Structure formats: C-alpha cells, structure tokens
Image (cartoon, rainbow, N blue to C red):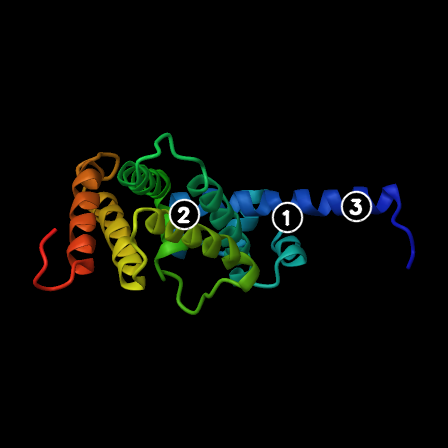
Amino acid sequence: MPLRTAKDDWRDAKRQAAHDAIVEAAWRLVRAEGLAGLSLRGLAVEAGITTPTVYAYFESKDAIYDSMFQQAASDFAERMAEPSGSSDPRQVLIEGMARFAEFCTSDPARYQLLFQRTIPGFEPSPAAYEPAIRALEATRRRLADAGIEDPRHLDLWTALSTGLVDQQIANDPGGSRWIDLVDDAVGMFLDHCRKAATPKGRKR
C-alpha cells in the first residue's frame, strides 16, 4: 500500500474544506428560502462556484441534504449529551426537554430537516442518521434514570417534545409561549407514567 504524502493530505484537506463550504452555503440558502428552496443552481450562486463544481462534490441534491443532516444530527447529539446541572431525575428531564426545544426553535430549517419529513423521497444514510440514534439513546437513559422504561413512554416523550416545538415555531416564532410549558409538560408526563406503572387497585 503506497504511503500518503504531505501533498495527499493537503489535497484531502482542500477537498474537505470545499465540501464544507458548499454545505454551509446550502444552510444559508435553506434558512432564507426554506428546505424546498434548495436548488443546485441557486446553491452554486450562493457558494460562488459553478453548478458543475457542485456536482464534483455531490452527486445529487439528496447527497447535499444527507451531508446537512449528518452535520445537524451531530450537533444535536453533542448538545443533548451535555451534562445536566442537577442530580434530580425530574429536573434532568426538564433541562433535557428545554435544551431540545432551544436547539430546535433556534433554527427551524435544521429542525425540519432532522424531525419532519418535508423533503419528498429523502432518507438520510445510515452514517448520517447514526448521531440521531445516539441522541435518542441518551434520552432513553435519562428516562430510565427517572424510572421510566416502557418504550411507549419514550414515544410519548418524543411526541410531547416535538409537539411543543411545532406549536412554538408555527404560532409564536421567536417567542416562548409553548417553551414556557416545559415544566408543566414534564410534570404531566411523569404523573402519567407513574400512574401507568401502579398496579390497578393500589394507590401510591
């Protein structure tokens, strides 16, 4: 196997930098025009390159979305993995849901790409989706630490979290009307889960 040279490393670094610059231009474009507004021609203009140059780095528009998804999912996994400032399981869940809501509402285009199927036919590749799986596993562990292990309750948690975000983005963009309900939502969730775990006929 031939040894890599400094020139090889330089070439790879240059290609990666160009790749990343195109992805950043794609983010600027979708934040201004929406996810559906991404076109290869428009992206080339935004990035200051030619359309054939875009194709030199990405074989299709979906390939660009895939790189964007992987970047967004990695950022999300890192954000959700940050340690809590509390050892109380309830407070950890409150902080986790608030952190999720802040991450999502701070960038609606990123939220839509990660959590809503707004691009017909697009599915992230396994490599791009892997950080999202890690983030979900971190959520599962936080719930388990609070004594919640029923898979249905994980589904309920994600539905509550995204529901608040959806309402916030749709009805009070830039505000906090629905984000302010995080404490109440977590309280209702925990009450429901504890009641579901209590055998019938027995009071806690």
Which comes sooner in the sequence, label 2 or label 1?
Answer: 1
Q: Tell me the residue that label 3 is attached to.
A: 11
Say whether marks 2 and 3 touch (CB < 8 Å): no
Say whether marks 2 and 1 touch (CB < 8 Å): no
Circle count: 3
Judge by depth and name the residue closer to the eye, 134 or 168.
134
Residue at (36% x, 60% y) in the render: 118
Q: In the rendered structure, which amino acid carries the disc numbered 3?
A: Arg
Residue at (65% x, 55% y) in the render: 57
Residue at (80% x, 41% y) in the render: 10
Which comes sooner in the sequence, label 1 or label 3?
Answer: 3
Judge by depth and name the residue closer to the eye, 132 or 16.
132
Of all residues, the one furthest to the front in this rendering is 202
Q: Tell me the residue that label 1 is attached to.
A: 19
Q: In the rendered structure, which amino acid carries the disc numbered 2?
A: Arg
Numbered tag placed on residue 110 in the rendering: 2
Q: Element at badge 2? A: helix
Question: How far apart in space, not on screen, are marks 2 and 1 (Cα)?
Answer: 19 Å
x and y, in percent, of residue 106 in the image: 35, 38
Image quarter hosting the N terminus: bottom right
Q: Nearer the viewer, mark 2 or mark 1?
A: 2
Q: In the rendered structure, which amino acid carries the disc numbered 1?
A: His
